[in-house]
Amino acid sequence: DVKVTQSSRYLVKRTGEKVFLECVQDMDHENMFWYRQDPGLGLRLIYFSYDVKMKEKGDIPEGYSVSREKKERFSLILESASTNQTSMYLCASGWAAGTNEKLFFGSGTQLSVL
Amino acid sequence: DQQVKQNSPSLSVQEGRISILNCDYTNSMFDYFLWYKKYPAEGPTFLISISSIKDKNEDGRFTVFLNKSAKHLSLHIVPSQPGDSAVYFCAASGNQFYFGTGTSLTVIP
């Protein structure tokens, strides 16, 4: 079975802190994604990466950066956390978007910024 | 601009009855559609998918219907069970994956 592992299930941080969310996948997938889920807004794409050291902005990249130094690992960085970044963060991996391809998600990290 | 829309934020159904979850999309270039199920504090899990060359795909109690002319798909769950209570996300595959806002299904015992 595909495994996408997010390093933390719950995190509490203070405003202004630098926050690292880590994600590791074990299926040698090319693509990795970071989404946030908020009530009424669904899953919104923050950043994605289609190869090592490559990254693309999603729909809501402001306030975030990412790092992909190894194929299996994709990190999301909040440079200076703010209260409006309190959310459920979901990492996903998969082959290229297309017919018969799907995303595999991690369990999520519930981040609270106080 | 939301390319995949789920206009019903919530749905309640009696156990044993049919649940119908709806999804609309705007981009006619989408060629593959998926449904994900999400429990609280867990990541979404893949449920069922359909290619644009088909109009129906069935997997046990779950059936997805695609109406390309209307740019509409629906997920039918028959019979509904209390364990089906979750948030369901519709997604479409283009150059990336586009997700709807989700429908929270409650199956009442």
Image (tube, rainbow, N blue to C red):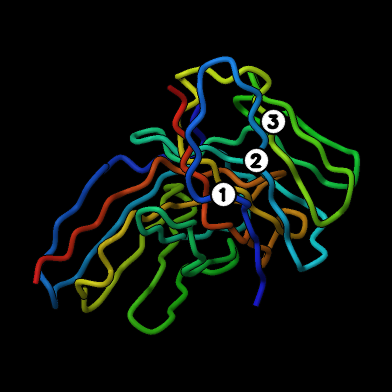
**Location of the C terminus of chain A (image quadrant):** top left
Residue plotted at (30% across, 40% down) = B7
Pointer 2 and pointer 1 on the same chain: yes
| SS of the residue under disc 3 | strand
Q: Is residue A112 rendered to the left or right of residue A93?
A: left
Asked whether the residues under the numbered discs 2 and 1 touch, taking CB atoms below 8 Å apart as contact, a structural biologist would say: yes
Q: Is residue B22 rendered to the left or right of residue A27?
A: left
Tag 1: amino acid: Ser
Counting residues from the start of the chain, the first of labels 2 and 1 encountered is 1
Give the answer, above or below, for where B77 lies relative to B38.
Answer: below
Residue plotted at (63% across, 51% down) = A7
The spot of residue A38 in percent (x, y) is 41, 35
Q: Please name the residue that numbered disc 3 is placed on.
A: A77
| SS of the residue under disc 2 | strand
The answer to which image quadrant residue B64 occupies is bottom left
The answer to which image quadrant residue B105 occupies is bottom left
Report the disc number at residue A109. Answer: none
Counting residues from the start of the chain, the first of labels 1 and 3 encountered is 1
The spot of residue B106 in percent (x, y) is 19, 59
